[in-house]
Image (spheres, grey):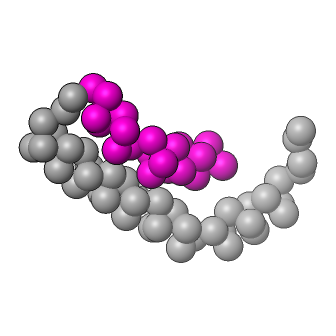
Amino acid sequence: MALSRGKAEEVLGGMDRAMRHGWSDRARRKQARSSGRRHAYAQRGAISADTSDALREVTPFRG
């Protein structure tokens, strides 16, 4: 949940944050490349979502 919320904030506020800080075009491209790599990690985590569901069923619920 925290990761998806951070991703949403990055998508929504990324460009005007870059404008506000006055980043160069090269820094903005580098940021986009790194966020793409982070997105690949997120997708690889989403592949094993059923594994985390199975783990959640086994472990007792602690709220």
Q: Quadrant of the C terminus?
A: top right
Rendered position, 4 above or below 2: below
Q: Residue 11's spot in the image, x, y percent?
A: 45, 51
In the image, what residue occupies the spot 88% across and 41% down?
62
Total labels: the figure holds 0
Q: Which of 51/20 is in front? A: 20
Q: Is residue 37 left or right of residue 42?
A: left
In the image, what residue occupies the spot 32% across and 28% down?
20
Corner quadrant of residue 57 = bottom right
In the image, what residue occupies the spot 10% across and 43% down?
26
Residue 18 belongs to magenta span: yes
Is residue 47 visible from the viewing direction of this image? Answer: yes
Rendered position, 41 above or below 13: below
Q: Is residue 46 left or right of residue 35?
A: right
Residue 14 belongs to magenta span: yes
Rendered position, 36 above or below 24: below
Q: Main secondary structure of the magenta part?
A: helix
Furthest-top residue in this view? 21
Q: Residue 56's spot in the image, x, y percent?
A: 79, 58
In the image, what residue occupies the spot 20% across and 44% down?
28
Magenta segment range? 1-21
Corner quadrant of residue 15 = top left
Q: Residue 36's spot in the image, x, y percent?
A: 31, 59
Corner quadrant of residue 21 = top left
Is residue 30 visible from the viewing direction of this image? Answer: no
